[in-house]
Image: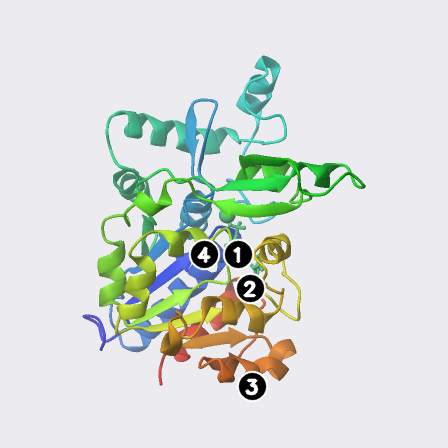
Amino acid sequence: MTGRTGLPRVVVLAGGVGGSKFSLGVRTALNRRADAEAAAPDPFTIVANTGDDLWLSGVRLQPDVDSIVYALAGVNDTVRGWGRAGDSERVNHELQQWGAGWPWFTLGDLDLGTHLARTGWLREGLTPTQVLERMSARWPLGARVLPMTDAEVDSIVTVSDSSASAGDLDGDIERPMHFQEWWTRHRAALRPLRFDNPGIGAAVAAPGVLDAIAQADVVLIAPSNPVVSIGPILAVPGIRAGLRATPARVVGVSPIIGGQVVRGMADVCLTAIGVETTAAAVAAHYGARSSEGLLDSWLIAEEDAASAAEIGRLGIRPVVAPLWMRDAATSAELAEAALRAAEF
Ligand code: GDP
Ligand code: CA
């Protein structure tokens, strides 16, 4: 089963950093396949995590959505890893003089332009999906980027307050905070008890998400944080069932290489939900489609080849491939390997 061009119809589930690098790779891999067939590729679909979203200084931020759009547009800051290339921070400085916003959360001037535009359109009554469609029209992204839901379901981390001062009695006082505060201000150093997306049980998938999954040939789970990036996407009612029901192959890419998280602090998140920081444990967390889970295939690094048998016993096809996305070329090779892992 393939799309109009004979190319696979692809859906990617993605968070910010890992998600955007992988999405760039998918675009390149699909473009190469299209070139080989002298065909124009159908845009693929990216379902973006919106659990990181928040209101700050009166504007709506969508960090993972923006990371993906900026990366596909080629205007992202590749050195810093977030925001716009060549951005300045004059407005941020002024906000700090006012004591507005969060002193530990920097917003670039160009980035604030995005947030102002988005907030204005939301205030005019557009849905987040419509806003994103409008924003995507500015650049030839080569992909349709959809928020996982139009509902506001911002991630809340509940920490044990005693973890702030070692030696206290454990676990008595619980303190909820926005995911961004825990991640950016505290660098994930406060021990998380749980992650919630209040209201997500009543949320619905954004328009187009379930149809894209149902009509896909391949669904790729990007090497994104399984707990706070992919977790919220899977928690939107209907998405997990859609992934279980789709005729597409569901292929995941391990965000864990050799027991390490590569970038970021996903290990702290995994520990909090009782999952080991290994490629095999994350595969087990997603589960096999053949037994109530999501995965048909799971890409692991050469370093983790020894766990292939264990993954196979779960009912998931293990595929060993180079998983480091060092640059555009390695990201594209990884994406091509993931597409091939769906062909069986
Ligand atoms: P965030 O939303 O910015 O935190 O980004 P994501 O959730 O999309 O991705 C973060 C995760 O991507 C990290 O926890 C890493 O485990 C993983 N990651 C980052 N770079 C790479 C890479 O080059 N290869 C692989 N396999 N995983 C990566
Ligand atoms: Ca994120």
The one nearer the camera, 156 or 249, is: 156
Residue drawn at the location 34% of the way across and 46% of the way down = 201
In the displayed structure, does residue 184 sit left or right of residue 15?
Answer: right
Label 3 or label 1, whichever lies nearer to me, is 3
Asked if ligand 1 lies within 8 A of label 1, the reply is yes
Task: State whether residue 85 appears in this view.
Answer: no
Q: Which mark is residue 225?
A: 1
Identity, as a three-letter code, of the amino acid under mark 4: Ile
Up the image or down, 65 lies above or below 116; here it is below
| Cα distance between the residues tagged 4 and 3 | 25 Å
Q: Residue furthest left?
A: 4
Report which residue position mark 4 lands on.
230
Quarter containing the N terminus? bottom left
Q: Which mark is residue 336?
A: none
* Mark 4 closeness class: few <14, some 14–19, many ≥20 residues within 10 Å: many
Task: State whether residue 309 appears in this view.
Answer: yes
Q: Which mark is residue 309?
A: 3
Identity, as a three-letter code, of the amino acid under mark 2: Pro
In the displayed structure, does residue 318 sit left or right of residue 34?
Answer: right
Label 4 or label 2, whichever lies nearer to me, is 4
Label 2–label 1 contact, CB within 8 A: yes
Picture coordinates of residue 308 (x, y %)?
56, 83
| Cα distance between the residues tagged 3 and 2 | 19 Å
Asked if ligand 1 lies within 8 A of label 4, the reply is yes
Label 4–label 1 contact, CB within 8 A: yes
Identity, as a three-letter code, of the amino acid under mark 1: Asn
| Cα distance between the residues tagged 4 and 1 | 6 Å
Count of all numbered marks drawn on residues in the image: 4
